């Protein structure tokens, strides 16, 4: 009787271990698939920009998906001047939208200004955005009422252009 009891415990542990290993393997696979789809086209964009334009040292590529979709990145030109560049992902003529980084407020400065105006907020993310023909800073956070908020500041940091607030659906 004791031997069959031990066998049952052993098989239970083996099955649980196998299920955990399968779950961990599937989680890793799913993460890689999601991350690959999130960064799809970044390498192609980098190669295209570096070979077909005067910009080199393309770095910090990310996607912006607003009314129109863009690949957003920083790159240096032939004079080693840093630029913020938006590459439209749709349309026949995909002209680069180039912003001189000297004409914009730095990410750190805009965050400092934002945090001093909203000391009870919980910061989520900041990224460059492009809407209605204007480059913007998109700051996302949770406010004191735990609402999700998206603020759009002008790229020079002088004004708040738009704010979207989303209430929690479930409490």
Image (cartoon, rainbow, N blue to C red):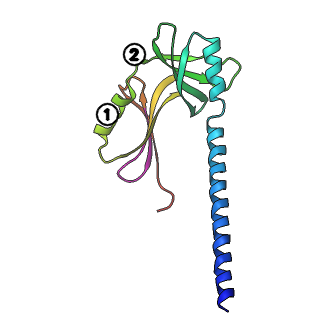
Q: Residue furthest right?
A: 92
Which residue is drawn at the image coordinates 31% and 34% (left, top)?
112
Quadrant in the picture for the N terminus: bottom right
Q: In the figure, residue 70 lies in which quadrant?
A: top right
- Above or below 53: residue 68: below
User: What whole-number distance in Å separates the C-alpha atoms at marks 1 and 2?
Assistant: 18 Å
* Residue 72 sits inside the magenta stretch: no
- The residue closer to the viewer here, 76 or 87, is 76
| Residue 146 point in image, percent of width and height | 40, 53
Above or below — where is 116 with respect to 82? below
Please, what secondary structure does the residue beneath circle 2 have?
helix
User: Is residue 161 something one can see in this rendering?
Assistant: yes
Q: Is residue 95 left or right of residue 148?
A: right
The residue shown at (60%, 15%) is: 50
Lower position in the chain sequence, tag 1 or tag 2: 2
The residue at the point 31 percent across, 42 percent down is 118
Q: Which numbered marker is on residue 102?
A: 2
Please determine whether, in this image, residue 33 is positioned above or below residue 113: below
Query: Does the CB distance between marks 1 and 2 fall below 8 Å?
Result: no
Residue at the limit of the structure toward the bottom, as seen here: 1
Residue to which mark 1 is pinned: 112
Q: Can residue 133 be spotted in the picture? A: no
Q: Is residue 149 magenta?
A: yes
At 67% from the left and 60% from the top, the residue drawn is 22
Highlighted magenta segment, given as a residue range? 141-152
């Amino acid at each position: 009787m004791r031997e069959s009891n031990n066998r049952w415990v052993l098989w239970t542990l083996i099955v649980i271990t196998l299920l955990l290993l399968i779950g961990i393997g599937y989680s890793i696979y799913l993460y890689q698939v999601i991350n690959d789809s999130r960064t799809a086209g970044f390498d192609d964009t980098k190669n295209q920009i570096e070979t077909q334009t005067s910009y080199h040292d393309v770095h910090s590529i990310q996607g912006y998906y607003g009314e129109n979709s863009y690949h957003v990145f920083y790159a240096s030109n032939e004079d080693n001047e840093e630029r913020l560049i938006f590459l439209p992902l749709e349309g026949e003529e995909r002209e680069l939208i180039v912003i001189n980084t000297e004409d914009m407020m730095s990410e750190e400065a805009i965050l400092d200004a934002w945090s001093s105006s909203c000391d009870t907020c919980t910061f989520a993310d900041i990224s460059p955005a492009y809407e209605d023909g204007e480059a913007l800073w998109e700051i996302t956070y949770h406010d004191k009422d735990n609402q999700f908020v998206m603020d759009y500041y002008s790229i020079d940091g002088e004004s708040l252009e738009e704010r979207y607030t989303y209430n929690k659906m479930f409490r």
